[in-house]
Image (cartoon, helix red, strand yellow):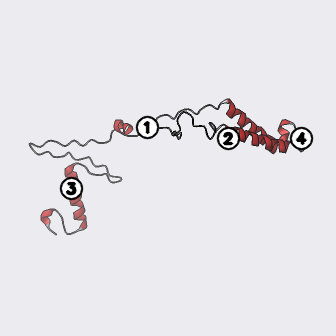
Amino acid sequence: MDPARGRGDRPEDDFESIVAGWRDEGSVPDWPGERAEPAEPTVQPGERPVHRPGPSAETEDDDHYHPPEPPPLPRPGPPAVVGGGLIGLGLVLCISPGLIGVGGSWPLPLGLVLMAAGLTWLVLRLWTGEPGDDGPDPHDDGSRL
């Protein structure tokens, strides 16, 4: 190898020359268990010093994205409460009718009818109009930006 380039015959010498080059630049990584003081960069006369900003406490917090608070959940309206109540009462009648003090063979069919009625009530609320109803804008597909 060429000794003029700062490299020796052994790989350790190559490594030491690389580390020496880093130390001349002023940025040397710390090895575990070793705390070396950073070398001051040498500035030639007539040359401007190079400022390399490092991470600080202020910039670390400012660099992260903080999403906005999510909007609050909408409150259910009276029709949604009625549909959910019918489904809930139907479930109670099907699973354990003894909780509300009824017995016999009629709570199961009544519970199934109440669950079907609650589900139908909620599904019917999804339709906004008749299939042939053009409404205010026939080209509106309901998407929102």
Residue 54 sits in quarter: top left
Q: Residue at x 90, y 43 (%)?
A: 104
The amino acid marked with disc number 3 is Ala
Q: Residue at x 72, y 33 (%)?
A: 82
Q: Secondary structure at mark 2?
A: helix
Q: Earlier in the sequence, mark 4 or mark 2?
A: 4
**Marks 4 and 3, how far apart at CA:** 90 Å
Whether 2 is drawn above or below 78: the answer is below
Query: Mark 2 sits on what residue?
Result: 123
Q: Whole-percent x and y of residue 128?
A: 62, 36
Query: Mark 1 sits on what residue?
Result: 66
**Left or right: 11 as drawn, with respect to 48:** right
For residue 20, the mark is: 3
**Marks 2 and 1, how far apart at CA:** 38 Å
Which tag is nearer the camera, tag 1 or tag 4?
4
Q: Which residue is at the front of the view, 48 or 139?
A: 139
**Marks 1 and 4, how far apart at CA:** 56 Å
Which tag is nearer the camera, tag 3 or tag 1?
1
The amino acid marked with disc number 2 is Val
Q: Residues within 10 Å of mark 2 (few under 14, many from 20)?
A: few
**Left or right: 26 as drawn, with respect to 87:** left
Q: Residue at x 25, y 67 (%)?
A: 11
Query: Mark 4 sits on what residue?
Result: 103
Q: Earlier in the sequence, mark 3 or mark 1?
A: 3
Q: Secondary structure at mark 4?
A: loop
**Marks 2 and 3, how far apart at CA:** 75 Å
Q: Residue at x 27, y 41 (%)?
A: 53
Residue 1 sits in quarter: bottom left
